Amino acid sequence: MNHDELFRQPSRSVAGVRKHVQIQPRGFTLVELLVVISIIGILVGLMLPAVQAAREAARRMSCSNNLRQIGLASHNYHSAFKRLPAGYVSYATNSGIAPPSVMMDAVTWDAGPGWGWGAGILPYAEGNAIAGGLRMDHPIWSSVNEDAIGSRVPLFLCPSTTGGDDAFLIADSANNPLSIDGRQVRVGRSHYVASHGQESCWGECGSVATGEVFTNIYTSATKIVPIDGDAGRVADGPFFRNSRTRFRDVQDGLSNTIFFGEHSSALSDKTWVGVVPGAFTHPRFSSPENGPDAAATLTLVHAGPSGGELDITGSPIIHPVNFPTYHVGQMYSQHPGGGFVCMGDGSVRFVSNFVDLYLWAEMSSMDEHEIIDWEQL
């Protein structure tokens, strides 16, 4: 046997001759392929809600952290100035007379410079780069501020919001771009707002001589108070026009009083910059109760009741987070089940859509001396 024949011989084993068998490859049948696709589809269907829930949990954590940082920044501001930042800064008058340079709104008495609470806390929230570009000795709409006021500030953006996080043009009463000195005003967006309390004092309230406020939300008792341009005579929350609230003014307790909360741009536009006189906030979708509101709602919201308003049952109108009135002047969140608020002590709480209405009103005022029952939250 030669060398070539040796290597052509079949291999042997103890059991005998092992034959070489050539196996033909076999593919999937159509039925098997459909079964595999069906199983994959079922697995994806089972996993998708879990993935979405995990992503929303991450977004909730990010939003909660934003509000916590905002609360901390407001405390640092208070440490520096012995007061909280104003809801927004406006030329103060009790007569409606102001220099032309401040562009006073004849109806609301809102005027320049207009800087809001968000702009005020920027240096205390690692926002020095943007704050350094703001000329607060000039009005918001001044040409020297044109670039800086349109800045995107991640701290003021909630990742669950679907209405956008880009800068937007300030609108007038007809929802057209507002023009001042021949220029439109584009401002950076915020998904967070400050609390004016139960009552609201914007629109015509900002300039009238007197107004009606609730003295007891449980009995619907009201009284007439002088205003004359001073929103602080109506507001019972920590932030309002030209507010200078100190922690000691929050007599209901910092841990019992809402300072900040969410307002998704899916409902209306809010800004960290401040208030421009003559501006209006417009809802992005309609409901039987919502509509445009005055410039103060670019930075502020309230909880209700306000101005002696009663519903058809004679009860005060209160609108907590996500309440189906969908006012541009209320809190609104796109987190499932409710929204976040930051209390005066810097703690962050998640408030259910089904929160007790009176509890919400109690948490929104700072010196009405209500008794908070946290079990209703």
Image: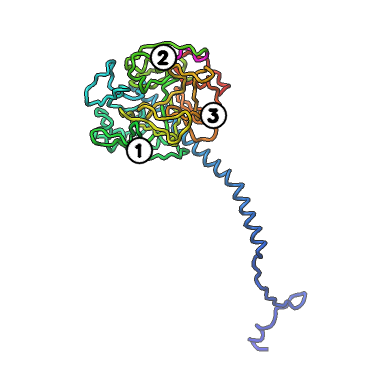
- The amino acid type found where label 2 is placed reads Glu
What is the count of numbered marks?
3
Quadrant hosting residue 72: top left
Which quadrant of the figure contains the N terminus?
Answer: bottom right
| Residue 86 at x, y percent in the picture | 35, 23
Identity of the residue drawn at 35% across and 38% down = 168
| Residue on which disc 2 sits | 212
Whether residues under marks 3 and 1 lie with C-beta atoms below 8 angstroms apart, the answer is no
Q: Between tags 1 and 2, which lies in front?
A: 2
Left or right: 68 as drawn, with respect to 25:
left
Cα separation, mark 3 vs mark 1, equals: 29 Å
Q: Nearer the viewer, residue 195 or 222?
A: 222
Q: Disc 1 to disc 2, how far (Cα)?
A: 34 Å
User: Going 51% across and 22% down the picture, which residue do you hit?
Assistant: 360
Mark before the other along the chain sequence, 1 or 2:
1
Pair 2/3: label in front:
2
Marks 2 and 3 sit apart, C-alpha to C-alpha, by 29 Å
Q: Is 332 rendered above or below residue 239?
A: below
Q: Type of residue at label 1?
A: Phe
Percent of width and height locating residue 131: 31, 33
* Span of residues in magenta: 211-218
Tell me which label, 2 or 3, sits earlier in the chain: 2
- Does the stretch in magenta take in 149? no
Above or below residue 3? Residue 124 is: above
State the residue at coordinates (40%, 15%): 249
Residue pictured at 47% horizontal, 15% vertical: 252
User: Which numbered disc flags the more N-terminal residue, 3 or 1?
Assistant: 1
Q: Name the residue under label 1.
A: 168
